């Protein structure tokens, strides 16, 4: 064999060896890679199993959460339905509250008005009670048993009028009394007292007025005539022989009370002024004769003296004889 052939076989051998070596190296690498892949596969398989377990757990949790979500959704829907119902009720309550508030305000206004009316009525009631108490005092003054207070010689109005009737010298005489008797009769209108308003001076039957009231209203009946005359006379001189007399006069129509003025002249003699009519005795007479003369002048069947009084004293009598004995 020649050298070229040898060289060729050597080259082929070397290439073959090189190829074998290379293949051996590649095989080793592949084997290593296979081992790595197998290891990675094993690791991935384990990871897969772990992840699959986690997935299953998550899936189970998800399913549980899904169930809970369904329950919560149902509860939410129920709560939403209740909320909607409550909201409707709340709005209805708001409307009702508004209506009640309006009613309350109206009632409060009515209450305030009623309270004002009540307070006004209470105030009026208190005023009426005060007026009533004043009326009681007023009526007690007029209908009490103390007739002496109706002789008022010290009243300024009485004194002023007296001074306009007679010339004042501090001494009352028969002529002065006649003048005063005529003045009272001419300046006082006869009127059966009729009471309407105690404040304004309207009076009712047998309602005694004080002399200054008789002067103010210029009317009255027999007791006003008599008490005014005695007060005017005593304003000139406060004598102890001039009296208002209360009597009962009798005629065919019956018995009537009547007031007049008695002058106790002394020596059991009496002088009578009937100021209501302007009449007076023609002269002083014994007491029984003076009474009879009065009856004759007015057509009475009899006269009974029941009491006499002045500003200090009041004397009541059971009969004319009692009066004569006192006189």
Image (cartoon, rainbow, N blue to C red):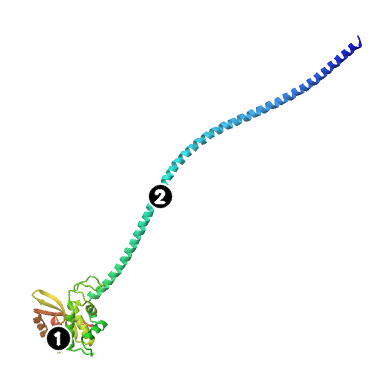
Quarter of the image where one finds residue 113: bottom left
Which of 69 and 216 lies nearest the eye of the viewer?
216
10 Å crowding of disc 1: few (<14), some (14-19), many (20+): many
Query: How much space separates mark 2 and mark 1, taking CA atoms?
Result: 91 Å
Count of labels in the image:
2
Give the secondary structure at mark 1: strand
Looking at the image, is 91 positioned above or below residue 299?
above
Which of 290 and 21 lies nearest the eye of the viewer?
21
Badge 2 is on which residue?
A: 98
Looking at the image, is 5 positioned above or below residue 256?
above
Specify whether residue 71 is in view: yes
Badge 1 is on which residue?
A: 271
Looking at the image, is 191 positioned above or below residue 26?
below
**Residue 24 on image: x %, y %:** 81, 19
**Residue 241 on image: x %, y %:** 19, 87
Question: Which residue occupies 43% across, 42% down?
Answer: 88
Give the secondary structure at mark 2: helix
Q: The C terminus lies in which quarter of the figure?
A: bottom left
Question: Which residue occupies 38% across, 52% down?
Answer: 102
Q: The N terminus lies in which quarter of the figure?
A: top right
Specify whether residue 327 is in view: no
Quarter of the image where one finds residue 285: bottom left
């Amino acid at each position: 064999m020649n050298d070229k052939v040898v060289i060729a076989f050597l080259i082929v051998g070397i290439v073959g060896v090189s190829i074998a070596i290379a293949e051996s190296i590649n095989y080793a690498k592949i084997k290593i890679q296979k081992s790595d892949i197998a290891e990675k596969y094993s690791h991935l398989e384990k990871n897969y199993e772990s992840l699959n377990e986690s997935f299953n757990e998550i899936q189970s949790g998800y399913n549980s959460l899904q169930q809970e979500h369904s329950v919560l959704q149902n509860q939410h829907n129920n709560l939403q339905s209740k909320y909607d119902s409550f909201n409707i009720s709340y709005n209805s309550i708001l409307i009702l509250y508004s209506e009640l508030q309006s009613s309350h305000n109206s009632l409060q206004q009515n209450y305030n008005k009623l309270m004002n009316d009540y307070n006004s009525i209470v105030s009026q009631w208190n005023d009426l009670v005060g007026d009533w108490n004043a009326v009681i005092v007023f009526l007690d003054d007029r209908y009490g048993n103390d007739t002496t207070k109706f002789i008022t010689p010290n009243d300024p109005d009485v004194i002023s009028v007296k001074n306009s009737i007679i010339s004042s010298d501090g001494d009352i005489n028969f002529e002065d009394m006649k003048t005063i008797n005529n003045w009272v009769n001419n300046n006082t209108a006869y009127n059966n007292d009729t009471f309407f308003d105690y404040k304004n001076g309207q009076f009712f039957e047998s309602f005694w007025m004080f002399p200054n009231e008789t002067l103010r209203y210029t009317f009255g009946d027999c007791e006003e005539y008599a008490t005014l005359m005695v007060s005017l006379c005593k304003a000139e001189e406060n004598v102890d022989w001039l009296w208002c007399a209360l009597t009962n006069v009798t005629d065919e129509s019956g018995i009537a009370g009547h007031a007049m003025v008695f002058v106790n002249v002394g020596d059991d003699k009496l002088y009578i002024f009937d100021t209501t009519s302007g009449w007076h005795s023609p002269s002083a007479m014994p007491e029984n004769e003076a009474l009879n003369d009065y009856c004759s002048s007015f057509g009475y069947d009899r006269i009974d003296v029941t009491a006499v009084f002045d500003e200090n004293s009041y004397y009541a009598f059971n009969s004319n004889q009692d009066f004569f004995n006192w006189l």
